[in-house]
Image: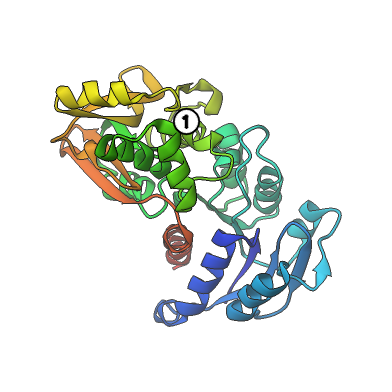
């Protein structure tokens, strides 16, 4: 039996709990059983031998809390001492100091527990520290869900393209920005009207700074640079500009050149950057909507393009599930 503890029980935490509940037959086919032995949010904690995912989600929805007890003052110590095998970290991203996720992840790794995380902050700021801690303690650190949601760019690069020399990467890494830019082009909307539409539809937060100023994309570029290209960089090494200054005139001028404007993350050729770029309408990266997409240039296979939904409960849970399955297989 593999015992998991879920840190954070918002949308993503609830999503992975539901997926664990619905995929028990899959785990059984791998001669494994996944048991949720604990979960906590910002104010409450619950623990037990085999917690029911449906009941956990229902309690969170009806009471606003997942647990029946107050969260411990020293959560790091709780993580170190609790009996579980894998920490599923779904705490929210904090790009300023990466807490509390950074402390939670390090506590798990240092106490010999695997980690699957969707949190960009710790990886974008302290990737080398986290990787070293995992290696030192002989455990796995998995983070597919931190970049691109259901777009499996990290696992594709590290597993299926393991024999390739990956030369560069260009990608749309934020679906909110892509939606806004596409609406500006298709409907001739000014930026802030397109932003309001994205907010009304739930694609953008009330405070959209992380999205429209390129913060989210830059964090993902830093993670990809480390994970795929073996660099030792962090979020602050990425040159960043967002889309809030893109005008209707700029969109129209791009259209005259048979191009669209997209917020593109770039790695390779000396670049580590996020910025609005002109993209020919025939290129895969001209895609509209909220999709994420990345194009890899490799030495043997040439250009490989991958896309997927970049956010959402099920999409992020899908990525975390793939990492959890990877840990199960590594046990065999």
Q: Going 58% across and 46% down the picture, which residue do you hit?
A: 134
Q: Nearer the viewer, residue 268 or 194?
A: 194
Q: Nearer the viewer, residue 35 or 255?
A: 255
Query: Compared to 200, does 18 lie above or below?
Result: below
Q: Position of residue 182 (x, y in %)?
A: 30, 39
Q: Quadrant of the N terminus?
A: bottom right
Give the residue at mark 1.
214
Q: Position of residue 130 (x, y in %)?
A: 60, 41
Is any atom of residue 124 visible in this view?
yes
Is any atom of residue 146 visible in this view?
no
Q: Nearer the viewer, residue 174 or 194?
A: 194
Query: Compared to 7, does 83 lie above or below?
Result: below
Q: Quadrant of the C terminus?
A: bottom left
Q: Going 67% across and 46% down the picture, which residue do you hit?
A: 106
Residue reaching furthest to the right: 73
Query: Compared to 150, does 280 lie above or below?
Result: above
Q: Nearer the viewer, residue 128 or 312?
A: 312
Left of 131 or right of it: where is 195? Answer: left
Query: Compared to 145, does 13 lie above or below?
Result: below
Q: Quadrant of residue 260?
A: top left
At mark 1, the secondary structure is loop
Crowding at mark 1 (Cα within 10 Å: few <14, some 14-19, many 20+): many
């Amino acid at each position: 039996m593999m015992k998991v503890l879920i840190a954070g029980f918002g949308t993503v935490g609830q999503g992975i709990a539901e997926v664990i509940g619905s995929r028990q037959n899959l785990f059984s086919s791998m001669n494994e059983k996944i048991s949720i032995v604990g979960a906590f949010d910002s104010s409450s904690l619950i623990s037990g031998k085999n917690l029911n995912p449906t009941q956990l989600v229902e309690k969170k929805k009806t009471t606003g809390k997942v647990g029946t007890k107050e969260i411990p003052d020293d959560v790091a110590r709780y993580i170190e001492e609790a009996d579980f095998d894998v920490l599923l970290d779904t705490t929210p991203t904090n790009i300023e100091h990466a807490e509390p996720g950074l402390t939670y992840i390090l506590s798990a790794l240092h106490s010999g527990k695997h980690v699957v995380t969707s949190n960009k902050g710790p990886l974008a700021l302290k990737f080398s520290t986290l990787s070293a801690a995992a290696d030192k303690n002989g455990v796995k650190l998995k983070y597919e869900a931190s970049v691109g949601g259901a777009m499996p760019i990290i696992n594709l690069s590290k597993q299926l393209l393991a024999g390739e020399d990956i030369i560069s990467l260009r990608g749309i890494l934020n679906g909110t920005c892509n939606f806004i830019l596409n609406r500006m082009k298709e409907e001739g909307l000014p930026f802030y009207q397109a932003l309001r539409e994205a907010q009304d539809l739930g694609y953008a937060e009330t405070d959209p700074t992380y999205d429209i100023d390129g913060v989210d994309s830059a964090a993902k570029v830093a993670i990809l640079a480390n994970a795929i290209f073996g660099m030792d960089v962090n979020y602050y090494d990425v040159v960043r500009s967002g889309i809030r200054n893109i005008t209707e005139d700029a969109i129209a001028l791009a259209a005259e050149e048979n191009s669209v404007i997209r917020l593109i993350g770039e790695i390779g050729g000396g670049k580590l950057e996020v910025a609005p770029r002109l993209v020919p309408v025939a290129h895969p990266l001209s895609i509209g909507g909220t999709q994420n997409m990345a194009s890899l240039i490799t030495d043997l296979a040439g250009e490989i393009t991958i896309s997927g939904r970049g956010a959402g409960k099920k999409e992020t849970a899908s990525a975390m599930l793939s990492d959890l399955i990877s840990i199960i297989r590594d046990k065999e």
